[in-house]
Image (cartoon, rainbow, N blue to C red):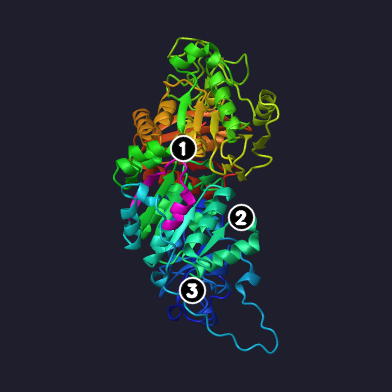
Amino acid sequence: MATKGVRAEREPAERLPVARVCVDVPLPHLDRPFDYLVAGADDVAAQPGVRVKVRFAGQLVGGFLLERAEASEHQGKLAYLEKVVSPERVLDPEVARLARAVADRYAGSLNDVLRLAIPPRHARVESPPAKAKGDAPAEPAEPAEPAVQRAFQAPVPGGWDSYPTGPAYLKALEAGRPARAVWSALPGEDWSLRIAEAAAATVTGGRGVVIVVGDARDLDRVDRSLGAVLGPGRHVALNAALGPAERYRRFLAASRHQVPVVVGTRAAMWAPAAELGLVVIWDDGDDLHAEPRSPYPHARDVLLTRAQLADCAALVGGFARTGEGQLLLETGWAKEIVAERAVLRRRQPAISPTGDDPQLARDAGAVVARLPSLAWQTAKQALQAGLPVLVQVPRRGYLPSVACAECRTPARCPECSGPLALQNARDVPVCLWCGRSFPAYQCPACGERRLRASVIGAKRTAEELGRAFPGVPVRTSGRDEILDTVPGEAAIVVATPGAEPVAEGGFGAVLLLDTWALLSRADLRAAEETMRRWLNASALARPGSEGGRVIVVADGSLAPVQALLRWDPGWFAARELAERRELGFPPAARMASVTGPAPAVADLLTIADLPDGTEQLGPVPAGEEQERMLLRVSRSRAAELAHALHVAAGVRSARKAAVAVRIQVDPAELF
């Protein structure tokens, strides 16, 4: 389709090149490029990837020039480009292909994805610095030194060579092969240095690297490691906290291919790179990797799609392993990088539960005590040895969830296996997925009818420990203040998950408290998230041979506790994936949520030509007089489902529907 305009009569259309433009109009039914003519004065500047201004429906709007063509299929008159905003080609062709694929995968529009991928323009950043009077003419910029001729810091002993397939992976990266791996990091691993070494191997082979981490603390660690391994001027770190101008300056350094390596938080998944050779994501289970803006893509899926399209290497790393990571291994898309058991035993701390039979025989109150005697004794011994102690407690603000009051088994719907919740103490359990209520609910494990839910915060825990260990400094790390590092001296650090600092030399003891508050969350990924948080905290402890101990206040027979005791995230991920495959949950299946006012949701589902076999779950209340429907299909029908929902949203948009409906494919949270 094309648009008409007052400038269309300047020259015959057949003699002028055509520009295909993605117009910045947030309407699903306009999710396609539009053809415009290019005036002779704009011919040089109007190249694929530049920002332009065009007339659309009588208004001047922005957009990106996607490609040039000799002719248009549109039979009518074409309008001219109004303006080339800047000759800077900010939309890399590889990123443009990726954006289209991500939009299709998440039932979104290309325009929405490009808003996420390209930062706002700062004209002064694009312009070269003004020359002082009398300065000599600037010399042309020298091309970057070939990466293959650059000597980087060699991988240190005890790093990648601790994994049987680690050295081979680095060689594959240096050779430019599309080696894809799921990496289970050893406890105490300097993971940021390992990532920097993988990046150096890729750059040595003459290719670029994009690295994504969860938060600013992780970004700082990788930034320092890249500087140490690559040397100065070989990478940029992208972070929203930099400010718009500085972030755009660093984006341009990557877009102009002045640096081969880009690292950043979630938005860096779109960063351009010359001859992309490796994409890396660390701790892919972190909820910070899920984009909260439409079309709500996940950084892991974006990077894996990018690796597939660019035929490049990929590294999915972490102390824990997600179901998605396990699926990559089981389908053969990626290979496993893990250490041998002998190496693991030397590196891991000694881990003990408080709820197993031997411990209960010594401490009968361990099953209900918040700080059982074993945890108290372990903390005391570490403090007496002059070592810091880390205490992990669940953060505040979880959505309500319920579990059996007797055995604490998470309460799930007998019909669809969704989580049950209570609105108040006198309410009946209601499924948050299908909306069914179960006034006569019984725990399938023990038959108990009573339900419970509780969370105790970090500040109260710090007060309790301060009374239990008088004279010992107690610090907290959480929402108000997050500590990056702490000295390797006697002190207690109470941290919420994700805010644990690194101790010099490692923590002497790590206590994992209030574990049921994590395990009983009303979330499909409750057990997986619990495993991830436990492993991330336990990895900060010293090795068992150096006195490092981890105490988990939970029953030792539980699967997450068993996986923690053996430090076996692969076994736990395989178990989780098998259960989800049996129940038809992601990633074994695909789900989409449709949220909005009830009439709008019903209207969209009536329009949508859903694939055969689509299962509808709900509706359930979603707050603010809205409801939500879940749609479930097999993985083989995922593209059909996304396309059907996008087309239906386009039909409603073309009809000028007054109320929008929120569509999320594979939402990060299924409540």
Structural crowding at the residue carrying mark 2, measured as other residues with C-alpha within 10 Å and reported as few (<14), some (14–19) or many (≥20) = some
User: CB atoms at circles 2 and 3 under 8 Å apart?
Assistant: no
Q: Which residue is depicted at the point 65% across and 59% down? A: 243
Q: Is residue 455 above or below residue 361?
A: below
Image mark for residue 240: 2
Instruction: Give the magenta range.
Output: 179-197
User: Horizontal placement of 671 versus 327: left or right?
Assistant: right
Which amino acid type is shown beneath numbered disc 3? Gln
Structural crowding at the residue carrying mark 1, measured as other residues with C-alpha within 10 Å and reported as few (<14), some (14–19) or many (≥20) = many
Q: Earlier in the sequence, mark 2 or mark 3?
A: 3
- Which residue is identified by label 1? 543
Q: CA distance from mark 1 to mark 2?
A: 36 Å
Which amino acid type is shown beneath numbered disc 2? Ala
Q: Which residue is depicted at the point 56% across and 39% down? A: 498
Secondary structure at numbered mark 1: loop
Q: Earlier in the sequence, mark 1 or mark 2?
A: 2
Q: Which residue is depicted at the point 52% across and 61% down? A: 227
- Which residue is identified by label 3? 47
Where residue 71 sits, quadrant-wise, is bottom left
